[in-house]
Image: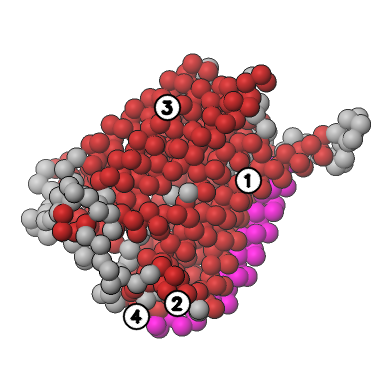
Amino acid sequence: MSERSRPSYPLARLIAQALPFADAASTELPLSRLLRLALFQVSVGMAMVLLSGTLNRVMVVELGTPTWLIALLIAVPLVVAPFRALIGHRSDRHVSALGWRRVPYIWFGTMMQFGGLAIMPFALLLLDEARTFDMGLIAATAAFLLTGTGFHVTQTAGLALATDLAPPDKRPRAVALLYVMLLVGMMLSAFVIGGLLIDFSPTRLVQVIQGAAVLTMALNIVALWKQEARAPERTRPDPDAPSFGALWRSFVRDGRNARLLTGIGIGAAGFAMQDALLEPFGGEVLGLSVGATTGLTGAWALGALAGFMYSGRALSRSGDPLRIAGLGLVAGINAFFLVIFAAPFGSPLMLYAGALLIGLGLGLFSVGTLIEAMALAKSETAGLALGAWGAVQATCAGAGIAIGGAMRDIIAWAATSDAAGTAPLIIGASRATGYTSVYVFEILLLIAGLAAIGPLVGRDRTSSTQSRDSADQPFGLREFPT
């Protein structure tokens, strides 16, 4: 960090020393402005905690909603995720009389996120009544889709804005700092929301979710205020830019890319199947409160942050990205063993440790596969490589969430009664059987992911390292995971 960009106040200096990637600050983008911009990531993290953490636990345990339905609702926003590359591409070429490229996308994404959160609690309460179930299902699907679309659009354009504002040599670390703030926002939101819902009631649920909607608007307006300068000349279309079809054909021509994307998809599904199950598992099997199970999301985010920081340190020492990804898969396998054994031992501590280790494994796997995808791409296809990585990651994660919820319900039904409803079809089954069966299947998927990426480790590392170190191929996280 240059002398001019170094914080002058003791508190600011302490933050700069303790916060990972605080050296991303520069004269053009000081740390105070960068942290203010990062507030949109805090709002995205808050929405993610609500969608994939708190709400699925409340809907399963308190409202008695079928797990497969919650898993399907959580997977709905991921339908938009494969289009993140298109969103970024459109914001790159957005034509505006005011000269803004990113601001319109961030603003409309914020409005969608606010609208989804505003109607969500009432939609969930409608699901609790048999006579209003159909209306509640339609409203809940719309709420989840609006919220998910909103934070995908906001995050994609916001990260693109960060790359516009930061100088070229600071862009990778600036975007990395924004992702750190996403995880910080998830941890803080998990603990705050969990504390507010310790004494659960439908009224309190409405207050918490709608309070999150108002806070989303406030945070994003503060984050966006006077960040992007008006420049009408930048909004003019570039007729010489290569077409999407040409870039895609060039990218998929390499068979190594196909194997890498296969490994990414298998691993993403393996980590994601538990997204709608971990908190209900803690509530139904271990008897944890809403606040205690929401803390599982905080533990997961803490583990993901640790994985991200370790990956950054290892990559700075010329570590192999695929070895880091493989380490993440191994961590995930051990994490699911911990979660499985938490039930017979009745140990919430083992469940928390498993959630922490799941986050760590996912962080290592995500960073490692993302950097490898970038290393395989040429400078003119880097965005396409990131888009392909994000599309496979999100699509397989969404499918994994939906399949995991359905698998849990089917196995739980088979474990509790036969066709006549007199005896279980699975001998020795318990309430945990449906959950643990999914966790075992996730272990098998992570092992398959290791088999898929294993042959790629150590191959063609010279060219990949050169491409990563080249000035034309900086370490960028423009499409980093949501």
Q: Which residues are magenta?
A: 434-463
How far apart are the alpha carbons under marks 2 and 1? Answer: 32 Å
Task: Label 4: state its secondary structure.
Answer: helix
How far apart are the alpha carbons under marks 1 and 3? Answer: 24 Å
What type is the residue that disc 4 sits on?
Gln
Give the residue drawn at x 44%, y 70%. 245
How far apart are the alpha carbons under marks 4 and 2? Answer: 20 Å
Mark 4 and mark 3 lie on one chain; the one further toward the N terminus is 3
Q: Determine if the magenta segment contains residue 39.
A: no
Colour basis: secondary structure
- Please name the residue that numbered disc 3 is placed on: 118
Q: Which mark is residue 250?
A: 2
How far apart are the alpha carbons under marks 4 and 1? Answer: 40 Å
Give how far across and how far down residue 458 sits, in percent: 49, 79
- Please name the residue that numbered disc 1 is placed on: 402
What type is the residue that disc 1 sits on?
Ala
Task: Label 3: state its secondary structure.
Answer: helix
- Is the C-beta separation of discs 2 and 1 under 8 Å? no
Q: Quadrant of residue 21?
A: bottom left
- Please name the residue that numbered disc 4 is placed on: 466
Q: Residues within 10 Å of mark 4 (few under 14, many from 20)?
A: few
- Is the C-beta separation of discs 4 and 1 under 8 Å? no
Is 118 situated above or below 325?
above
Q: Determine if the magenta segment contains residue 457.
A: yes
